[in-house]
Image (cartoon, helix red, strand yellow):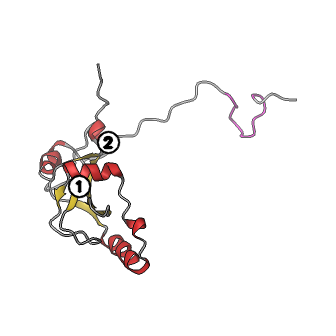
């Protein structure tokens, strides 16, 4: 019987071969021409999905399907949320909170954190591109839904931030 190294099912390869090559590194992204880094671009509005979820709630009455906020999301809304300025579409209480999350490989460890809306203008000049997600949360009935997402940044790619070293 022939050993796997001598007769491979794929021509030109050897099973168990050492010295596998790593793929070449990806070239850095090209700079993007951006007039105003603080102006949202690539905007995605989730109003249709939100409307469909609320219609399903009114038709079927299955509140557990749409009012299922994670405890950590509720805690984040309590301590870091900003007033949305509109009542909750489910329970009609006026204390709907809004959270703003930012994501980018350029941000390193700080990617995925909740930011105050006023911070976004400063971040737009610090990073080439980052995606912002706006989530509305009701702490009373646990309604939560992504409202909007968009990209901010000055268009000049930076090297991704590394992990912070802890002593």
Tag 2 or tag 1, which sits nearer the N-term? 1
Tag 1's secondary structure?
A: strand
- Quadrant the C terminus occupies: top left
Which of the 4 image quarters holds residue 107? top left
Q: Which residue is mark 2?
A: 105
Rendering coords of residue 63 (x, y %): 39, 69
**Direction from residue 49 to residue 131 in the image, left or right:** left
Q: Is residue 58 above or below residue 111?
A: below
Q: Which mark is residue 45?
A: none
Q: Residue furthest top?
A: 167
Q: Which residue is mark 1?
A: 99
Q: Which residues are magenta?
A: 5-16
Asked if the magenta segment contains residue 152, the reply would be no
Which of the 4 image quarters holds residue 149? bottom left
Type of secondary structure dominating the magenta stretch: loop
| Front residue of this view, candidates 26 and 142 | 142
* Image point (20%, 59%), residue name: 40
* Image point (80%, 27%), residue name: 3
């Amino acid at each position: 019987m022939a050993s796997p190294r001598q007769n491979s099912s794929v021509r030109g390869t050897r099973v168990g071969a050492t010295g596998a090559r790593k793929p070449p590194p990806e070239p850095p992204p090209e700079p993007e021409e951006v007039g105003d880094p603080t102006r949202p671009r690539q905007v995605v509005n989730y109003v249709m999905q939100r409307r469909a979820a609320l219609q399903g709630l009114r038709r079927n009455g299955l509140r557990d399907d749409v009012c299922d906020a994670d405890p950590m999301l509720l805690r984040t809304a309590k301590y870091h949320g900003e007033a949305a300025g509109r009542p909750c579409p489910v329970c009609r209480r006026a204390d709907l909170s809004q959270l703003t999350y930012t994501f980018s490989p350029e941000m390193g460890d700080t990617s995925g954190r909740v930011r105050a809306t006023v911070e976004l203008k400063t971040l737009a000049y610090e990073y080439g591109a980052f995606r912002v997600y706006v989530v509305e949360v009701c702490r009373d009935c646990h309604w939560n839904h992504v409202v909007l997402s968009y990209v901010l940044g000055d268009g000049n790619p930076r090297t991704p931030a590394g992990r912070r070293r802890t002593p």
